[in-house]
Amino acid sequence: MVNALEPMSSVTEILKLLPAEEMQHMKRVGILVDRFTEKLLLCDLLNECFEGYEFFGKAAFYHDIGKAWIPNRILTKPDRLTEPERLIICNHPVFAHKLFGQIRQGLISGIPEHLYQLAMDSAMYHHEWWNGNGYPYGIRHYEIPLIARITSICDAFDAMTSTRIYRKSHSCEHACQELKKCAGTQFDPELVKVFLSDKT
């Protein structure tokens, strides 16, 4: 069963529901996305005219905000998740969609207008796969917003290289090998190539 959130008026209140580890992960992903975006600009793979690219890092911070709907006992569980628990976790992009709908209606404040669409795209689509086998919507290739394709890579890299409650961190080398292996299936292959360009 997911969290039955009390009525809240701001995103700040909602973020306080998340475990400290989740908040730190979100901050690190935002920083990674910001740096990756700068690299894409230098490689001419991101048109400077692309609206909002300078806000990608700030928007990507919110990518896991949908996890506020998930009980902390699941988010901080040190053991293997049950199938029902895993399905709840997989719904956090859907929970984020609901949240952004409430923001659009003016029921919740806290995300500036210039970040709204980018933050929503990052939160809703960062678990979609390049080949269409991701979740929750099963979209593929360029149907996935650019910020979500970027966030997906940074999210996976940070998840692998950070110590989690259920496992120790992997090496940067291991994470890079995994990203390379999943390029063209889980991740946009061109973006992976650029991400790894100064790490191998």
Image (cartoon, helix red, strand yellow):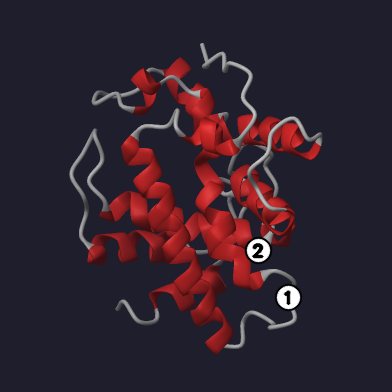
Question: Which element is circle 2 on?
Answer: helix
Residue drawn at (21%, 39%) of the image: 167
| Label 2 – label 1 distance at C-alpha | 10 Å
Horizontal and vertical percent position of residue 86: 45, 25
Q: Which of marks 2 and 1 is in front?
A: 1
Front residue (pair 125, 52): 52
Q: With respect to residue 94, does 177 lie above or below?
A: below
Left or right position of 174 against 40: left
Residue that appears at 65% across and 63% down: 146
**Number of residue marks:** 2
Q: In this view, does 62 lie to the left or right of 105?
A: left
The amino acid marked with disc number 1 is Phe
Would residue 130 appear left or right of 181 to someone viewing this image? Answer: right
Task: Give the secondary structure at mark 1.
Answer: loop
Is residue 49 in view?
Answer: yes
| Residue labelled with disc 1 | 50
Q: In this view, does 74 lie above or below 53?
A: above
Expressed as whole percent of the image width and height from the top left, the position of residue 26 reads 43, 49
Expressed as whole percent of the image width and height from the top left, the position of residue 185 reads: 53, 56
Q: Quadrant of the C terminus?
A: bottom left
Relative to the observer, which residue lies in front, 120 or 159? Answer: 120
Image-quadrant location for residue 17: top left
The answer to whether one can see residue 187 in this image is no
Number of residues whose C-alpha sits closer than 10 Å to that of mark 1, classed few (under 14), some (14–19) or many (20 or more): few
Q: Are marks 2 and 1 in contact (CB under 8 Å)?
A: yes
Q: Which residue position is annotated with label 2? A: 146
Q: Which mark is residue 173?
A: none
Q: Identify which amino acid the numbered label 2 is placed on.
A: Leu
User: Would you place residue 16 above or below residue 154 in this image?
Assistant: above
Look at 31% across and 77% down and name the residue there.
199
